């Protein structure tokens, strides 16, 4: 597979995974708002948070994949990428908590909480122990991912963002163990379909019963991998399909923009002109031609600071998430 195709598929799968992970936390936004946020529009805080989750996922998977080992700094960097733009949590971005927190119950008291994590002074040692476990090679990989995730969630080492970093950790486990090489498996779409069961499995784990969590991760991994095959097959042929229909002249702006939109499905006018390698006039003509063919669409509705998306790629993101969730319910 060409390097550009690998890059595009990797980005697509990471976006699918991070969007589902955000939805588990009740952070939702439309595909259009998400695309705007990818282009730098911060008007929708949920969409901006989804993009931050994608950045954090990429950071953790890349760091762990390149070194072949987990380190605490990898998790801290990913957390900083996730929370640095959050007005309420930026102060704590990229560092372990130094206060007590809890899950559920009142905001002011842990009395009726579902889970009270360890005291903050215990967190560093517990994280070191977890990282040692994540770097083992003598544990079945899905078991390691499920247990590592559940333990991370139980330690709850950050003031916020633990769920999204904990689910990114799963993808990093798969990359370190060689299960994935260029992309991630959108396991979280499966967990999203079984959200109540997922949280119940975390509760079981904290009571000393990990089987339910392992089973859920195994099922989600299988379903996500099978459903992803269809999306990958469709995405791989998109450039050839566009070229066959438009038959652009070699060296033209259209010929340059077809692979550009494949690799970068969300682009501003300035980015498009840079990618086209042509004059502003020729670039605009190419945009019109791609729009008329239905391959791209403008999503801001404005005359200035406009943004275009590769329609089929963005639609595929939502469709893959939907198909995984449907398959989990069968």
Image (spheres, rainbow, N blue to C red):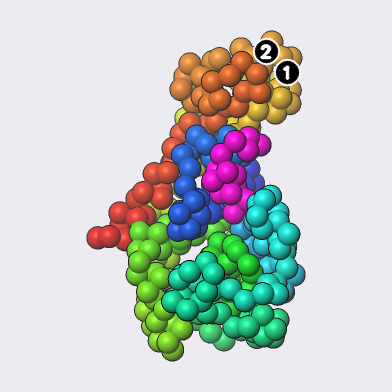
Residue 46 in the magenta stretch? The answer is yes
Residue 55 in the magenta stretch? The answer is no
Mark 1 → mark 2, Cα distance in angstroms: 6 Å
Which percent across, then down, holds residue 5? 58, 44
Mark 1 vs 2: CB contact within 8 A = yes
Asked which quadrant contains residue 179, the reply is: bottom right
Name the foreground residue: 298 vs 156. Answer: 156
Q: Which mark is residue 278?
A: 1
Q: Residue at x 35, y 64 (%)?
A: 194
Q: Could you tell me which secondary element the residue under label 2 belongs to?
A: helix
Q: Alpha-carbon neighbours of circle 1 within 10 Å: few (<14), some, or many (≥20)?
A: some
Asked which quadrant contains residue 329, the reply is: bottom left
Q: Residue at x 66, y 23 (%)?
A: 305
Q: Is residue 276 left or right of residue 266?
A: right
Q: Alpha-carbon neighbours of circle 2 within 10 Å: few (<14), some, or many (≥20)?
A: some
Answer above or below: position of 210 versus 301: below
Residue on which disc 2 sits: 282
Q: Which residues are magenta?
A: 40-53
Name the foreground residue: 75 vs 11. Answer: 75
Question: How many marks overall?
Answer: 2
Q: Characterize the magenta stretch by its predominant secondary structure.
A: helix
Which percent across, then down, holds residue 213? 41, 76
- Residue extending farthest front: 108
Residue 174, can we see it? no
């Amino acid at each position: 597979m060409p390097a550009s195709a690998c890059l595009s598929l990797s980005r697509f799968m990471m976006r699918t995974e991070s969007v589902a992970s955000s939805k588990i936390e009740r952070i939702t936004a439309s595909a259009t708002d998400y695309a705007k946020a990818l282009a730098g529009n911060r008007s929708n805080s949920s969409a901006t948070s989804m993009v931050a989750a994608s950045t954090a996922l990429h950071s953790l998977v890349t760091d762990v994949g390149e070194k072949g080992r987990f380190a605490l700094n990898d998790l801290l960097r990913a957390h900083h990428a996730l929370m640095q733009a959050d007005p309420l949590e930026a102060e704590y971005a990229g560092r372990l908590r130094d206060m007590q927190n809890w899950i559920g119950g009142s905001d002011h008291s842990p009395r009726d909480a579902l889970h009270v994590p360890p005291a903050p002074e215990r967190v560093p040692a517990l994280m070191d122990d977890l990282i040692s476990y994540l770097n083992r090679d003598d544990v079945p990989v899905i078991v390691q991912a499920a247990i590592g995730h559940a333990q991370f969630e139980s330690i709850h080492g950050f003031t916020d963002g633990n769920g999204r970093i904990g689910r990114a950790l799963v993808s990093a486990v798969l990359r370190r163990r060689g299960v994935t090489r260029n992309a991630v498996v959108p396991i979280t779409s499966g967990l999203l379909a079984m959200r109540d069961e997922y949280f119940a499995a975390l509760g079981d784990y904290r009571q000393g019963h990990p089987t339910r969590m392992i089973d859920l991760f195994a099922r989600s991994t299988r379903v996500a991998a099978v459903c992803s095959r269809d999306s990958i097959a469709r995405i791989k042929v998109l450039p050839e399909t566009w070229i066959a229909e438009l038959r652009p002249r070699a060296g033209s702006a259209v010929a340059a923009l077809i692979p550009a939109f494949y690799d970068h499905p969300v682009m501003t006018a300035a980015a498009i002109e840079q990618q086209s390698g042509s004059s502003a006039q020729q670039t605009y003509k190419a945009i019109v031609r791609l729009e008329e063919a239905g391959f791209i669409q403008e999503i801001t509705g404005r005359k200035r600071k406009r943004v275009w998306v590769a329609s089929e790629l963005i639609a595929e993101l939502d469709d893959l998430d939907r198909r995984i969730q449907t398959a989990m319910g069968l």
